[in-house]
Image (cartoon, rainbow, N blue to C red):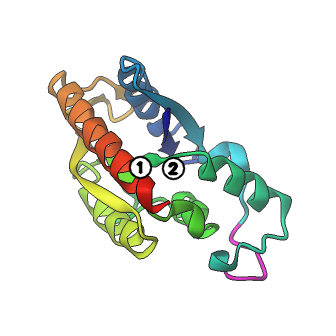
Amino acid sequence: MMRIAIILGSTKPGRNGEAVAKWVYDISKKRNDVQFELVDVAEYNLPLYDEPYPAMMQQYQKEHTKKWSQKINEFDGYIFVTAEYNHSVPGALKNAIDYLNVEWKNKAAGFVSYGSAGGARAVEHLRQIAGELHMADVRAQVMLSLFTDFINMSEFKPDPRHEDEVNEMINQVVAWSKALKVLR
């Protein structure tokens, strides 16, 4: 059975992303053709990249990297849940992605973002990163506004229309994950 990770990329205390990621996960659980798992970058306690060899060599020396690699390698595709910090992705998410290379290759990636501009600029950067790592990013994207999908920019109350957007993005991630399986 296909396995898709929903990766929560923000690690800051009081993050909005936790509610967003759980919402995406709850929507995903309505499907029975794919397994979904919520993967929280914060639980891996990754320091700033500290491996002596480039990630593409997979000569990991640190236990935290080996643990992260094993987890990410379990999946056929990914849904990244990201905040937008200063027109880009959270540093913790970029760092977590940079730890690995081959593990991401030939897998699909979808994006759920939130921020004052819906997180659009963070996803622009993530699409470039995904392309460099040979991930196939899907077109459908979910953008959540801090002004309209959150009360006081902190309590998550998504507009109901976003559920259809999540399902479309999931459909594309699943389809591309299946198509890319022959390359893995």
Which stretch did the figure color magenta? Answer: 48-54
The residue sitting at the left extreme is 161
According to the picture, the residue beneath numbered tag 1 turns out to be 82
16 inside magenta stretch? no
Query: Secondary structure beneath disc 1?
Result: strand
Q: Work out whether 51 lies above or below 166.
A: below
What's the residue type where badge 1 is placed?
A: Thr
According to the picture, the residue beneath numbered tag 2 turns out to be 9
Please say if the residues under marks 2 and 1 sit with CB atoms less than 8 Å apart. yes
Please give the name of the residue rendered at 36% of the width and 71% of the height, measured from the top-left corner: 131
What's the residue type where badge 2 is placed?
A: Gly
Q: Of residues 106 and 16, which is closer to you in this image?
A: 106
Residue 73 visible = yes
Q: Of residues 97 and 42, which is closer to you in this image?
A: 97
- Residue 48: mark in rendering: none
User: How far from the left and from the top, in percent, is residue 13?
Assistant: 59, 41
The answer to which image quadrant residue 24 occupies is top left
Please tell me which of labels 2 and 1 falls first in the chain.
Answer: 2
Q: Work out whether 21 lies above or below 92.
A: above
Q: Work out whether 99 lies above or below 84.
A: below
User: How far from the left and from the top, in percent, is residue 85?
Assistant: 40, 59
Mark 2 residue crowding within 10 angstroms, few (<14) / some (14–19) / many (20+): many
User: How far from the left and from the top, in percent, is residue 93?
Assistant: 53, 58
